[in-house]
């Protein structure tokens, strides 16, 4: 049986780029990105014979990211990804598909004596994400966030679960629910892109967090579904929401040896193992995602 080349792609991963926009000599804007580009197309020659005529060096991809980062104004990461993907597919006949994954690290202005400091920031928690694929079947975009830790100190129960001879978990009517949200949402290919990527991102993030806070949880699975459903209900142009929710278990400490009752006050925070709740909430009539959309 012949040996053949299977699916392949290549690119530059994690190009770190900080972009300073100098409104005046001292009033600046800051954007801190991590951009990964991955290309595929007619690349058999390099794999089979080492003929690199059709290979766009990954170093060139790095350079393009830096060059495009000077666009003024620097667009939302979704638009930045679309520009990069369009460039690679349009500029190189051998490349038919470009995938771009972008992370944006949030920096917030340090509070100064006279208000938010014009050119000093502190890194805030959480990461904004975007993924773009441009290929023969079309263009698709996903947005998302990661590393957003949330906790609610009541309004969460877990009981009625399946039991067997190994079950030791006690059912609870009141527990801490804590997780670190990783979410991605896919924009419909058949619909208009949002007029304002930033506003769409903020609305989705705020809805995810508000729904986590306001849903009386009977399981993290139910909370996951409710969070995804709320985002889809509000933004017609979204097809699908993917959520990854680790369950950061908080265990009430037994203080009775010290004669101290512990009515839900002192908890042991465990970092591992953790429950890992993952799921997709989708619009029933949405076209399926392009297979290689860079969600992660
Ligand atoms: O919300 C939860 N879902 C589970 O599936 C689970 N399993 C578990 O031990 N605790 C929890 N909590």
Image (spheres, rainbow, N blue to C red):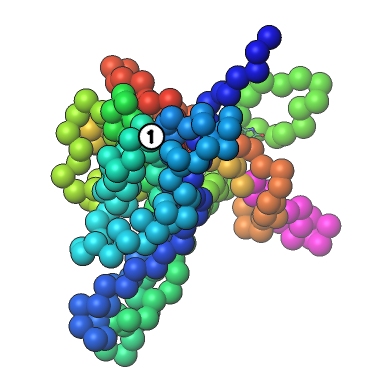
Ligand 1 is found in the corner quadrant, namely: top right
Does 282 sit left or right of 57 as displayed?
Answer: left
Would you identify the image quadrant in which residue 96 lies? Answer: top left
Does 12 sit left or right of 228 as displayed?
Answer: right
Compare residues 165 and 46 and report the one nearer the observer: 46
Instruction: Answer whether residue 77 is magenta in the image.
Output: no
Instruction: Answer whether residue 257 is magenta in the image.
Output: yes
Would you identify the image quadrant in which residue 113 lies? Answer: bottom left
| Residue under the image location 70 percent in, 55 percent down | 268
- Tell me where residue 170 appears, x and y as whole percent: 70, 34
Residue most toward the bottom?
A: 113
Does 52 sit left or right of 172 as displayed?
Answer: left
Residue 119 in sight in this render: yes
Q: Quadrant of the N terminus?
A: top right
Compare residues 201 and 34 and report the one nearer the observer: 34
Does 277 sit left or right of 112 as displayed?
Answer: right
Magenta segment: 249-262
On whether ligand 1 comes within 8 Å of the CB at mark 1, the answer is no
Numbered-mark total: 1
User: Callout 1: 10 Å neighbours few (<14), some, many (20+)?
Assistant: some
- Tell me where residue 247 appears, x and y as whole percent: 59, 42
- Tell me where residue 132 appears, x and y as whole percent: 35, 40
- Tell me where residue 174 appears, x and y as whole percent: 56, 42
| Residue under the image location 36 percent in, 56 percent down | 64
| Residue under the image location 33 percent in, 35 percent down | 93
Residue 204 in sight in this render: no
According to the picture, the residue beneath numbered tag 1 turns out to be 94
Compare residues 48 and 39 and report the one nearer the observer: 48
Residue 105 versus residue 51 in the image, above or below? below
Residue most toward the top?
A: 1
For numbered disc 1, what is the local secondary structure?
loop
């Amino acid at each position: 049986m012949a040996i053949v080349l299977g699916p392949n792609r290549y690119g530059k991963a994690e190009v770190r780029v900080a972009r300073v926009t100098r409104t005046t000599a001292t009033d600046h804007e800051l954007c801190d990105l991590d951009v990964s580009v991955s290309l595929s197309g007619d690349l058999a020659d390099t794999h089979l014979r080492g003929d690199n005529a059709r290979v766009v060096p990954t170093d060139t991809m790095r350079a393009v990211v830096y060059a495009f980062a000077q666009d003024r104004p620097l667009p939302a990461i979704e638009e930045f990804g679309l520009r990069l993907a369009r460039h690679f597919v349009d500029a190189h006949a051998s490349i038919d598909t470009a995938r771009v994954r972008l992370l944006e690290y949030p920096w917030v202005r340090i509070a100064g004596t006279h208000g938010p400091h014009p050119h000093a920031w502190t890194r805030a928690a959480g990461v904004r994400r975007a993924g773009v694929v441009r290929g023969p079947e079309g263009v698709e975009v996903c947005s998302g966030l990661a590393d957003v830790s949330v906790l609610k100190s009541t309004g969460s129960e877990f009981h009625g679960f399946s039991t067997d001879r190994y079950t030791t978990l006690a059912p609870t009517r009141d527990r801490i629910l804590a997780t670190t949200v990783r979410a991605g949402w896919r924009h419909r290919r058949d619909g208009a892109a949002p007029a304002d990527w930033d506003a769409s991102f903020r609305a989705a993030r705020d809805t995810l967090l508000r729904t986590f806070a306001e849903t009386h949880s009977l399981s993290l699975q139910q909370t996951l579904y409710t969070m995804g459903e709320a985002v889809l209900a509000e933004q017609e142009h979204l097809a699908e929401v993917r959520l990854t929710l680790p369950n950061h278990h908080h265990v009430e400490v037994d203080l009775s040896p010290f004669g101290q009752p512990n009515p839900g006050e002192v908890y042991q925070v465990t970092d591992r193992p953790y429950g890992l709740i993952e799921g997709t909430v989708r619009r029933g009539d949405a076209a399926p995602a392009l297979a290689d959309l860079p969600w992660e």
